[in-house]
Amino acid sequence: MTSVPPPASAVEANRLGIAALQTGDAVTATEHFATAIAGDPQSGALQRNLASAWRALGEDERELTALDAALAIDRRDLMAWIRKGERHEARGDKGAALAAWSAAIALGGQLNPVPPPLEALLAHGQAFVAAATDTMFTAASGAFGAIRSELSETEARRGEAFIASALGRRRVYQNECAGIYYPFLPADEFFDRGHFPWFAEIEAQTDAIRTELQALLDDPGEALRPYVKMDAGTPESIWSGLDNRLDWGACFLWEYGEPNQAVLDRCPATAAALAAIPGARIPGRAPSAFFSMLKPHTRIPPHTGVTNTRAIVHLPLIVPPGCGFRVGGETRAWEEGTAFAFDDTIEHEAWNDSDDLRAVLIFDVWNPHLGERERDLLLRYFASADASGYAVPR
């Protein structure tokens, strides 16, 4: 579809307006621009020119009216948003300035590259937005801090995430399941300790479990293997750098519901601690439990897991400085002997930036938000799938 050229009278009036503005005659410029707009009322550029003339005359309200008229023609008019941001900022209209600069930054982010004349303008807008949200974050955090002691662990974590996400401090991540997805479960990153009253019992066994792991690593035999083992013919992916390498190694005690008896026999304290856990028992699927070893200067890339019906528990055993773990928008440092649980269908990653080995006991249990009857439903679902003969091999 071809655009219709503006009437010659509008082009001439605009030319005269620009000439007048350049000579400092802003009053005459407004008259010419008004004539041009009458001839071509759907031109946002003419409205912006008129806004420039009103700015030269110090007529804030009229400038903003012209800019709003330009945006009524095209909400994607970047320069109109920039000029609105400048004017509202100069007037001290903080909220309106924040809205205008935010719109300008969003539009500017779509430009690649950003034209040099716009770089400084957008940089100013970004600085304004950053300062504004810093102020708001400080105020909101103070208001939150006044009641934090009255909140449960769940309420406090949700409240902190809300404030941070509302003010652009963090992203809220969603579940991404490669396998079974159970609808309407909370998409939380870390599960609260209150869901797992038995944490203290397995934490009390940390020293004994660590001792067994160290003996196992002294003579691992075939127990230690690469955690990542891709099928032949698999194309390049985020896992290629770890494929068939012991940079991320694992010693399995249980794997997809099957015991690795040779390792269990060598680690009786660990086996007993795992046996005491009220975990999921799904034939051919759960539990899995393994010692996870991450060599120095190794990273596990951001990824998501298979199903949100489970929680993944970490019991840190050997954690040199420089190790970290992120789930969604929250990063935690492992603390030896302190367990935590998370939803691995939310993007997560791990790293060991130290010069020493990092080791964690990892195992899965039911997602605590699943009720007893829902757990029974899942067991029946998997049993029926297996009985049908159509269950997809893992």
Image (cartoon, rainbow, N blue to C red):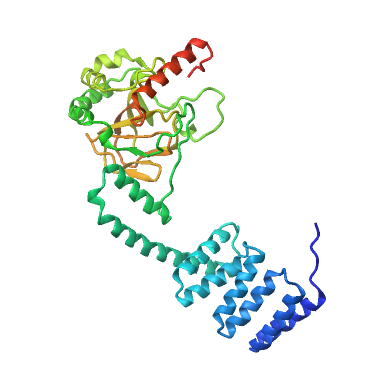
Q: Quadrant of residue 374?
A: top left
Residue 245 drawn at (x, y percent): 42, 28
Residue sitting at x 40%, y 62%: 133
Q: Is residue 117 left or right of residue 148?
A: right
Q: Is residue 11 left or right of residue 256?
A: right
Residue 275 visible here? yes
Residue sitting at x 58%, y 60%: 107
Residue sitting at x 57%, y 75%: 64
Residues 196 and 315: in front is 196
Q: Quadrant of residue 32?
A: bottom right
Residues 46 and 18: in front is 46
Residue 225 visible here? no
Q: Which quadrant: the N terminus?
A: bottom right
Residue 172 drawn at (x, y percent): 43, 46
Residue sitting at x 74%, y 78%: 36
Q: Residue furthest front?
A: 373
